[in-house]
Amino acid sequence: MAGTKIYLSSPTMHGEEQEFIKEAFDTNWVAPLGPNVNAFEKELASFVGTAHASALSAGTAAIHLALRILGVGEGDRVFVPTLTFSATANPVVYEKAVPVFIDSEEDTWNMDPKALEQAFEKYPHPKAVIVVHLYGTAAKLDEIMEICKAHKVPLIEDAAESLGSTYKGKQTGTFGKIGIYSFNGNKIITTSGGGMLVSDEEEITRKATFLATQARDPARHYQHSQIGFNYRMSNITAGIGRGQLLHLEEHKALKKAIYEQYQRAFADIKEISLNPLNQNGDANCWLTTMLIDEASPVTPDRVMDALEAQNIESRPIWKPMHLQPVFAAYDFFTASGEEKKEEGKGSVSARIFDRGLCLPSDIKNTAQDMELIIRIVRKCFGR
Ligand SMILES: Cc1ncc(COP(=O)(O)O)c(C=O)c1O
């Protein structure tokens, strides 16, 4: 067993974070809200290029509020990519709405526009579409936005994993009516936990902030005309975010270098391909993942076991939502129409799950760490 653990993607702190926190302590802006929250919102909005932002306690909270703001309620359908983390789909169910799962395409692994069209054929009036930019790679936004526009359905961008990634020169998270980001512990920048909701419409972020602070009406006493939530980011957390944001571009460059190193290291192994990057974009390469050809006897489990034996963290690809017990009752659409839901090779997303794994993508990995990881993976393929 190797001495120190090699992580999949752990926080990388720099020092400025502590300065912002110290300032908060020195001025006793520990609570409630405070200048770091407002500044972090402004700085993040300016970085991604949206007019407005609302800092929240989590990316999941941001998705929940996005749905609330768009009026998603009981019985409404929301189209969601199947290949994602459950946090994309859970808030749909919080609102007693109905998720409809959409298969991936091969080029970016994200929501397949053809499968999305199939879902619209059967259900022409969903209340919203959520698109995810998996592992930092932009989805086929032009196609997806065109479909949403034709059907007059708002698009929510779950850019939890893709902060800093661009599509045709524009930041992911800024294409939809509402975008959301996550700053949880393993993301490209972290606040330990947190999220942001962004929009060009001030009314939307104003509403998000209002709902996130218990929906308190403007009155001296505590007056409420709507159900609210305790979803706001704290001033301490926002201080960490401000410090981290200064290093986002640097983190992105290091993540991309990791992807490129794996690409070179496995170039001679035919059975291995990495997660495809959208050619119309510039990905933040949050996690590098690999796919093992179906014809290969090597399984993702074998590679993960070999890494784990050396105290190296890797993990499976997100298990598609349509294969999750909790979402088993919901519809699932592939490019060729509705499909049976059993595990196996019936859909693009199931195959990616079946044959893929996430490689260690921690930007603090040393050259020796990377060499060790690469050596172990190559050995699994007899190299
Ligand atoms: C695609 C996706 N959506 C949503 C979330 C939820 O973000 P958070 O953990 O900040 O609630 C995450 C990460 O956890 C994610 O990867």
Image (spheres, helix red, strand yellow):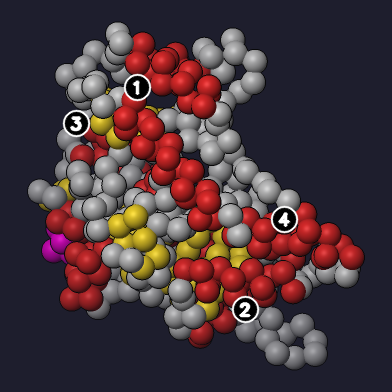
Q: Quadrant of the N terminus?
A: top right
Helix, strand or loop for disc 3: loop
Q: Which mark is residue 17?
A: 4
- CA distance separating discs 2 and 1: 45 Å
Residue 226 is left or right of residue 92, and the answer is right
Q: Nearer the viewer, mark 2 or mark 4?
A: 4
Q: Is residue 227 visible?
A: no
Tell me the kind of residue under disc 1: Pro
The image position of residue 248, as x and y in percent, is 54, 55
Decide: few, some or many residues near mark 1? Use Cα within 10 Å; few <14, some 14-19, many ≥20.
many
Say the numbered circle drawn on residue 345.
3
| Mark 3 surroundings within 10 Å by alpha-carbon count, few (fewer than 14), some (14 through 19), many (20 or more) | few
Inter-mark Cα distance, 4 to 3: 46 Å
Q: Nearer the viewer, residue 189 or 178?
A: 189
Q: Earlier in the sequence, mark 2 or mark 4?
A: 4
Q: Which of the two residues, 264 or 245, is positioned nearer the viewer here?
A: 264
Q: What is the chief secondary structure element of the magenta stretch?
A: helix
Circle 2/circle 4 CB separation < 8 Å: no
